[in-house]
Amino acid sequence: MYPFIRMAGEMVRARRMPPLGPFEPHVSHHRVWPWDLDPWVELNNGRTLTLYDLGRLPFSLRTGLIAVLRREGWGMTVAGSSVRYRRRVRAFQRVAMVTRLLGWDARFVYLDQSMWRAGDCTSQALIRSACTDRAGIVPPARLAAAMGLPAESPPLPDWVLAWAGAEATRPWPPEVSPDAR
């Protein structure tokens, strides 16, 4: 089940924090509970992605993104992700999460998120997000303008461009469907 109560707590905390500029990092702190674990008694890889939501939404509130989305009648969706898992996180351990905007291209917004425990990075996620309306994807330049930002993004890091380029070569839909035998 989605952690709605935890999310509400994070949003209440974010409302009490000062606003952030769009490229400033949001830092949040989270505890790993037994329901976040996999059979090996460590943070489940799927739950890691859910916990990253607990950083992105408060970041969006503090940067003013949520206000813009509401005003314009837009939504946001995750359009892709890549996660590196490097250190185990076990029950009841606390992690610090850093969420920051990297920039955007013609279609997507890119965010970098990482979890840290005792000075070590446990995982890092690259999130590709899309702003949407009823017609489909809203160009990020339009979103930037609505937020009072320049239409052109700061240069994206090479590793983000390489990942986006690799994703562009990936076939869609997948070559094998459930009907294949």
Image (spheres, helix red, strand yellow):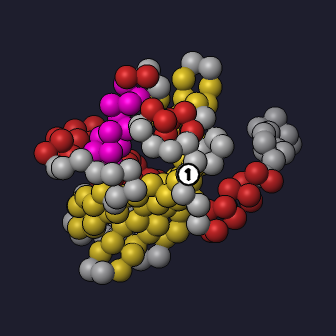
The reply, left or right, for residue 119 in relation to residue 137 is left
Using the image, determine if residue 64 lies above or below residue 52. Answer: above
Name the image quarter holding residue 8. top left
171, above or below 34, in the image: above
Residue 100 in picture, x, y percent from top left: 40, 58
Relative horizontal placement of residue 25, taking residue 142 as reference (left or right) = left
Identity, as a three-letter code, of the amino acid under mark 1: Ser
Q: Is residue 54 visible?
A: no
Task: Report the span colored magenta.
Answer: 57-70
Element at label 1: loop
* Residue 81 location (% of width, % of height): 56, 53
> Looking at the image, which residue is at 30% across and 81% down?
119
Residue 133 lies in quadrant: top right
Magenta span includes 65: yes
- Depth check: give the residue in front, 24 or 169: 24
Q: Quadrant of the N terminus?
A: top left
Q: Quadrant of residue 181?
A: top right
Q: In the rendered view, tell whether residue 180 sits above or below residue 52.
A: above
Question: Circle 1 sits on which residue?
Answer: 153
Q: Position of residue 164 (x, y in %)?
A: 68, 56
Q: Residue 110 versus residue 94: which sits nearer the camera? A: 110
Residue at 25 percent across and 58 percent down: it is 28
Is residue 157 found left or right of 27 in the rendered image? right
The question of residue 61 being in magenta is answered with yes
Residue 53: percent from left, percent from top: 38, 47
| Mark 1 Cα shell of 10 Å, populated few (<14), some (14-19), many (≥20) | some
Q: Residue furthest left?
A: 16
Asked whether 1 or 72 is in front, the reply is 72
Q: Residue at x 50, y 45 (%)?
A: 150
